[in-house]
Image: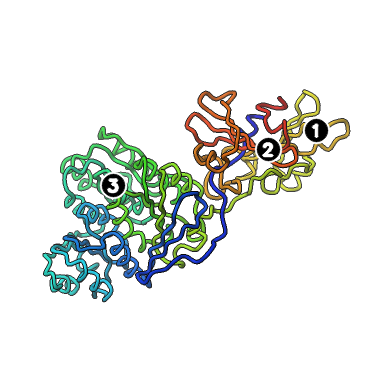
Amino acid sequence: MIALAATLLTAGFSAVPDGPAAVASDDGTEVSTQSTLPGVTVNRIGGADRFEVAVNISKAAYPATTTDVVIATGTNYPDALSAGPLAAAKRGPLLLTTADRLPPVVETELERLAPSAVTIVGGPNSVSKAVETALAALPSAPAVVRIAGADRFEVSRNVALALPAPVTTAFLAAGANFPDALSAGPAAALLGGAVVLVDGRASLVGTATESLLRDTLGVRGVKITGGPNSISKGIENQVASWGLPTVRLGGADRFEASVAITDDSFAAADEVFLATGLKFADALAGGASAGKAGAPLYVVPSDCVPQPVLDSIVSLGASTVTLLGGQASLSSAVRSLTPCPGWLIDFGGVGPVRIGTPTASLADLNPALEIVDFTEGYCIQAYFPNAIEPWASIDVLSDSGGPGSSYPVDVVGVAGASGASAPHTAAGIGVGSTLSSVLAAYPGASVTNHQHIPGGKHIDVAGPSGTAMRIDTGADARVLAISTGRTPQVRYSEGCA
C-alpha cells in the first residue's frame, strides 16, 4: 500500500493524569515526578513576576556566592538575548531589572550572591544610570562595567567581543523577534560561540557584522537560526560566500526551529529546560542558566509540548526537565509533558477516518477523495491529493471488497505530516519521531528490517480483535509512516500484497 503511506504516525509517550500537586517550596520552585516520559522528573522554577523568576533561577543555579553577575532590562528582550552566553561564560547568573530602578527582590539576591563584578548589558535607556549607581553601592562593592551600543545590533556585537576567545561559532538571530535566539543562547554557550543579532529582513548583513565575524572574531562556522522569514536567504548566501561552513536551523514554526537548533548542537544532556515561546522574559535568565549547565532550552506552547520536542528530549537521554515560569506561562499540561493535540492514530483508524467505514463515504468527510482501483481482486486505495494537511497525508486501503461491495476501510496510513498538530498515537508517536521513542513507547513490539529501505525498520504493534499498527522508520531511525487497521492488510507493503 504505497508503503501504506509508509505506515502511520508519530512516536512519543502517552499522557498520564496530572496526578498529585507538585511539591512547592518557598523559593517558587516545584518538583514533580509525573510526566509522560518514563524516568523523567519535571521541575518548575516560577515566581511572582519575571524578576522573581530570574532570581529563583539564580538561586537554583548558584546556591552559594559568585564572582560575576550580568544585568539586563527585563522589559525588552534584545540586549539579554546576546547576554546569555556571556553570563554562562562568566559562570554567573543573568538577572533582570526595570530601566529606572533595581527591583527589591533582585537587590536582595545580589546581596546574597556578593559579586565582585557586575556587567550591565544595554545603554542608559535600557538600564539607567540610577540602576548602575545602585549596583556599585552593593555591600560587596562590585566593579560595574557596561556593554552598550547605538542599537540592539551594536550591543550584540559588543557582547560578542566581551566573550572569552576563541569565539568559534556565530549564531545569527533576527533582532526583530526573540524565539530563535532563546534556544540559540545555550547552544552558543556550549560551543564557545556568540549570538549575534542581525536585521533579518535585509538582503545582507552590514559591514560591521561582517567585519566582526570574518576579521575580529574569525569564527569558523555560522549557524542561521530560523527560516527565511526570520533571516533572509540573501544573508544566508552572503555568509556562505565567505567560505565558512554555514547551516540554517529552521522549521515550520518557532517550536520546530527550537528543536533544530538543539539537535544540531547537543548530542546528550542530563537536563533540559522548557520556556514559553510566546513571551520572552522567563527564558532570558533561564537561557543563561541552561548555558552554564550545558543544557538545551526549548521553547514550547503554553498548554502542551510539541511531539518533536518530546522526541528530542528522549534522544538526548535527559532525566530532568525544568520548566521556566509559573502556571500562566507553562500550564500543568506542560508540567506533565502532554503532547500537543492532533488527529489520534489508534487501532480503529486515524482521526475521523475509521476502520470499517465505506470508502465511498469518505468523500462526505472530504471531497478531495480520489480512489485508485487495483486490478488484483477487489482492492482499492483512496487518497486526498488536493486537500490540505492532515488529509493530504492520509491514504486508505480496502481489501475486503467484492461484487456490489461498498469497500470498507481495512487500513489507514499516514506519511509526510509532521509537527505538533500532525496525527499521533496516544503514546505521542508520529512521523518524524525517533526509533528509540517508538521502542520506548511500545516495548513489546516486533521489529524487523524494512523490506524496501536499507537500514529501515518495520515495528509491528499488536492490537485487539485482529488489528495492528505498523510503524516504518528510515535509515535515519526516524518514523516515515504509520499504518493502522486489520491484519494481514496492515502489513502490506504495496497495494494488496
- First in sequence: mark 3 vs mark 2: 3
- Residue at image position (45%, 51%) is 40
Horizontally, residue 384 falls left or right of residue 419, namely right
Q: Distance between the residues labelled 1 and 3?
A: 56 Å
Residue type at mark 3 is Ala
- Residue ID for mark 3: 188
Residue type at mark 1 is Ser
- Judge by depth and name the residue closer to the eye, 199 or 192: 192
Q: Quadrant of the N terminus?
A: top right
- First in sequence: mark 1 vs mark 3: 3
- Judge by depth and name the residue closer to the eye, 237 or 372: 372
Q: Is mark 1 on a helix, strand or loop?
A: loop
Tell me the tag on residue 378: none
Q: What element carries label 2?
A: strand
- Residue ID for mark 1: 400
Tell me the tag on residue 468: 2
Q: What element carries label 3?
A: helix
Horizontally, residue 429 falls left or right of residue 352, namely left
Residue 288 placement: quadrant: bottom left
Residue 487 placement: quadrant: top right
- Residue at image position (71%, 24%) is 497
Dot in front, 2 or 1:
2
Query: In the image, residue 279 lies at what x, y percent?
Result: 40, 62
- Judge by depth and name the residue closer to the eye, 440 or 100: 440
Residue type at mark 2 is Ala
Query: Dot 1: within a 10 Å radius of its alpha carbon, few (fewer than 14), some, or many (20 or more) residues?
Result: some
- Residue at image position (17%, 52%) is 162
Where 161 falls versus 136 (above or below)? above
Horizontally, residue 38 falls left or right of residue 59, namely right
Where 93 falls versus 241 (above or below)? below
Say whether marks 3 and 2 touch (CB < 8 Å).
Answer: no
- First in sequence: mark 2 vs mark 1: 1
